[in-house]
Amino acid sequence: GNSVTQMEGPVTLSEEAFLTINCTYTATGYPSLFWYVQYPGEGLQLLLKATKADDKGSNKGFEATYRKETTSFHLEKGSVQVSDSAVYFCALKLAGGGNKLTFGTGTQLKVEL
Amino acid sequence: DTGVSQDPRHKITKRGQNVTFRCDPISEHNRLYWYRQTLGQGPEFLTYFQNEAQLEKSRLLSDRFSAERPKGSFSTLEIQRTEQGDSAMYLCASSPGLSGSGRGELFFGEGSRLTVL
């Protein structure tokens, strides 16, 4: 079946450190890929997306590249801030799936001064 | 505030009781989704509506669960004869459908947390 696997957290970094959160997927066909973020006390919100192979999604300094050959969509940021502390979810959507998303288990990021 | 709103935010109930959650989507969105999230897990799809039609239901949605979206506006999720395993965060999301730049983006509410004692 379709699934998303994320690295386990929590990930704890110092401010201005480089961030990578790994995400790999299993899917039939060619899904669209997403990163959602959940800040403390808030609902999930879309961070970035990529709809086809080699596309790069970017937002707020975060980037992720859709790699079909490795079925991956790793999230990266060059310099994290304390305000980036949140839970990050990788997700996929199949074509014709009615916007239904399959999520990974989430990775908690803690950024310290 | 014009985002997705859910009510109640927290519900504590005894096993065997019925509970109902309400979701008000973003007004121009014709698609509405229910997800369930347990501690340490990602959201799991339960069901979705396009306008008033319920188009898909997950195997997770047992016979004790029922969702409605009368008139294609707000939606309710009812759980009958609650069990301790129903304790979770119930998330509602809406989307404008598959056209345009919003393709694939869901807008989530803050969730309704259910605790079954």
Image (spheres, coloured by chain):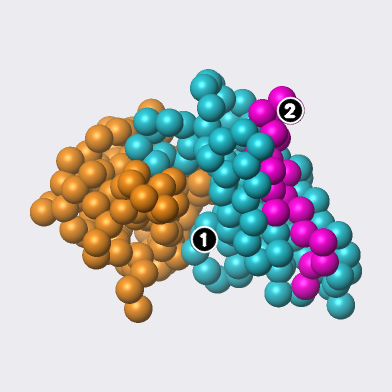
Q: CA distance from mark 2 to mark 1?
A: 26 Å
Q: Which residue is mark 1?
A: A45
> Element type at marker 1?
strand
User: What's the chain of the residue with tag 2?
Assistant: A
- Residue B7 is situated, as x and y percent measured from the top left of the image, at 32, 67
**Front tag of 2 and 1:** 2
Q: Tag on residue A70?
A: 2
Magenta stretch prevailing secondary structure? loop
User: What's the chain of the residue with tag 1?
Assistant: A
Give the magenta part as a residue range: A63-81
**Residue for point 23% across, 44% down:** B50
**Which amino acid is tagged 2?**
Thr
> Element type at marker 2?
loop
- Residue A105 is situated, as x and y percent measured from the top left of the image, at 63, 44
**Magenta stretch contains residue A72:** yes
Q: Does B73 sit above or below residue B46?
A: below
